[in-house]
Amino acid sequence: MNYRDADLIDALAAEYVLGTLQSRARDRFEALLRDSPAVRAAVWHWESQLGALGSHLRPVEPPMAIWQAIARRIAPPRTISSLRGTRFWQGCSAFATAAALTFAVLLTSVPTEHADRVALFANTQQAPQWLVSIDSRSGRLTSRALNTAAVQADRDYELWMLPGAGAPPRSLGVLPANGHTLERDLPASMNQSLRATATLAISLEPTGGSPTGAPTGPVLFQAQLFEL
Amino acid sequence: MHTTLDDQDDLKRHLLAASRGDQIAFNLLYQKTSARLYALALRLLRRRDWADEVMQEAYLRVWHNAGDYVSERGKVIAWMATILRYRAIDRLRREKVRGRFSQPIEDDVEPIDTEYDPLELLSQGVNAERLHFCLGGLRAEQRRSIAAAFFEGYTHEQLSTKMQAPLGTVKSWVRRGLQLLRQCIEQDALQGDDRLRGAP
């Protein structure tokens, strides 16, 4: 068969889309489809034409259950009960129950989009201070200042990851002021290190962050990263 | 015909947003397309339970592959309908292997009105109108065999049995029918653009 014949390709593409191209012929054609933009274009053309074949049908409203089933598969609801069984819940023995509950409520009400890891910084009274959420796939880090004490005019809070095993802390940037949210897209190498990091810390630095690349002020808070 | 143009633009926007994980946009896409696709699913599968399941599979495919859509693939609704049809045909063939067949919709279920709806056709725009016009120009056996392949997922062998004609004859009905369809569509497209420019 001369696959370079455009008419033949077109005829095969039509039968492929229609569904009448079978077994070995179909397999051969699918291999062509993968490798040849011209064949792809022919198939797309027929799909677009034949796609209109069902268009004379009177629309029928589908039952709500169909959408509900779809929605469940694309976005599992982040309810408090769905957090059970994750390591987050098991790790909460480190928190007083009230703080853990606050954390859970925050997680479900604060849009964390595609975050798969979170850390909550609490002060000595267990009051939530910052919520840091991370989308490991995209490297987006979101930090939200919940009810933070005002900081001196010449100071900023800076976030660090503690990679452990004697490795030095690495800066994840300055944190936002009370009530604000900051998003950062981490460079790939940082995101990579972060995946292997379990602990984050916050130190008090000069405005704009540490000038040296290492913490210069006191480390005031520490928090574990939990997987969602 | 402006409704159709707006529709396509909206659907493209929703699909693009959905490809970035926007679930609200995906829901809007569902709201605007699901009734048309459900009608197709019911027509193809003739069983509500199969139609419901195939709808889910198809929309999940759309969600996961939203980034694959490009304008060269035609209208968004046609692309989605193709995804649904492939899933439906797969399902029909699987069930046939298991000895289960599609039956007419159960009597106790509200009958599905799958009558030809000219208004619906018009609202689908030029492509659909043209296709149906060109289908009308085919010989009955050509049209019937193409429709049976499309809507029931019949293979050449099954068509040969169903239409009680030799395999070679059936193959040429399909092949020639598609050829004529293509020629008619292209010709109509060239002539029709003038005609439609003045359409309301």
Image (tube, coloured by chain):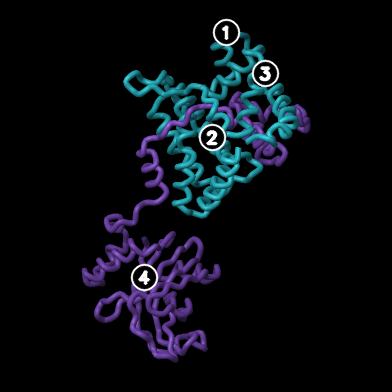
Secondary structure beneath dot 2 equals helix
Residue B83 placement (x, y as % from top left) = 53, 36
Which residue carries the number 2 mark? Answer: B81
| Callouts 2 and 4 on one subunit | no
| Callouts 3 and 2 on one subunit | yes
In the current view of this chain or complex, which residue is farthest to the left? A97
Mark 1 and mark 3: Cα distance apart in space? 23 Å
Secondary structure beneath dot 3 equals loop
Residue A220 placement (x, y as % from top left) = 35, 84
Circles 3 and 4: CB distance less than 8 Å? no
Residue B148 falls left or right of residue A116 = right
Q: Nearer the viewer, mark 2 or mark 4?
A: 2
Residue B54 falls left or right of residue A87 = right
Mark 3 and mark 4: Cα distance apart in space? 67 Å
Quadrant, the C terminus of chain A: bottom left
Residue drawn where x is 36% and y is 20% of the image:
B106
Which residue carries the number 3 mark? Answer: B137
Provide the letter of the chain coloured purple: A
Disc with the residue nearer the chain's start (1 vs 3): 3
Mark 3 and mark 2: Cα distance apart in space? 24 Å
Q: Nearer the viewer, mark 3 or mark 4?
A: 3
Secondary structure beneath dot 4 equals strand
Mark 2 and mark 1: Cα distance apart in space? 30 Å
Residue B116 falls left or right of residue A151 = right
Which residue carries the number 1 mark? Answer: B164
**Chain B shade:** cyan
Q: Nearer the viewer, mark 2 or mark 1?
A: 2
